[in-house]
Amino acid sequence: MSLSLHTLKPAHGSREKSFRIGRGHGSGRGKTAGKGTKGQKARSGGRKKLKLKGLKQMLLGFPKNRGFQSRFPDARAIPVSRLDAFDAGATVSVASLKDLGLMRRRDVSAKIVGTGSIKKALKITDVKVTAGAKAAIEAAGGSVAISKKTKPKSKSNNK
């Protein structure tokens, strides 16, 4: 049969007939038509819709996000043994660590931790270093130089 306007019909089972309520006892949804007995919700036009009921109702509508997310990201921990990827005498900074793929692009700062050993003399600049890592770097003939960055002053309402 060819496809034309008078032969179009939806796929079998794609459209279900709606349940007709309030059509007598034999229908299974007669008398109270599935609305229970009496009360505001049983009436025509009944049931108050959800209205704003002050601040409490607004707070109940917010998603339940638990926990705490700090504004200050943690430093990326890099083991001393991973610094062997650098050439001897190279300068290690946050930018050079990102270039070698030891840090992700979105990481802000790094901290070299003293797990493992190093055999090359490297110059570490503006990267946090633990005491054990500093000892391992200096034992290999390297140096650690960290510039002191001033903390931003807190905004206070003192007048």
Image (cartoon, rainbow, N blue to C red):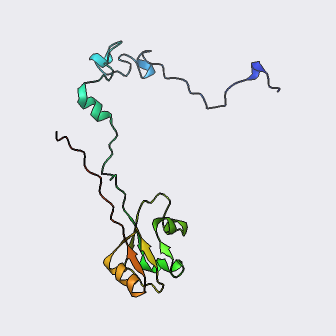
Quarter of the image that includes the C terminus: top left
- Residue 47, quarter of the rendered image: top left
Q: Residue 75: x and y, percent? A: 38, 64
Relative to 123, residue 12 above or below: above
**Can residue 146 be seen at all in this image of the molecule?**
yes
Relative to 155, residue 99 above or below: below
| Residue at the outermost left position | 159
* Residue positioned 30% across, 52% down in the render: 152
Name the residue nearer the viewer: 62 or 147.
147
Q: Residue 144: x and y, percent? A: 38, 76
Name the residue nearer the viewer: 63 or 9.
63
* Residue positioned 75% across, 18% down in the render: 6
- Residue 51, quarter of the rendered image: top left
Name the residue nearer the viewer: 139 or 105.
139
Q: Is residue 40 left or right of residue 139?
A: left
Relative to 131, residue 51 above or below: above
* Residue positioned 52% across, 82% down in the render: 88
Q: How many marks?
A: 0
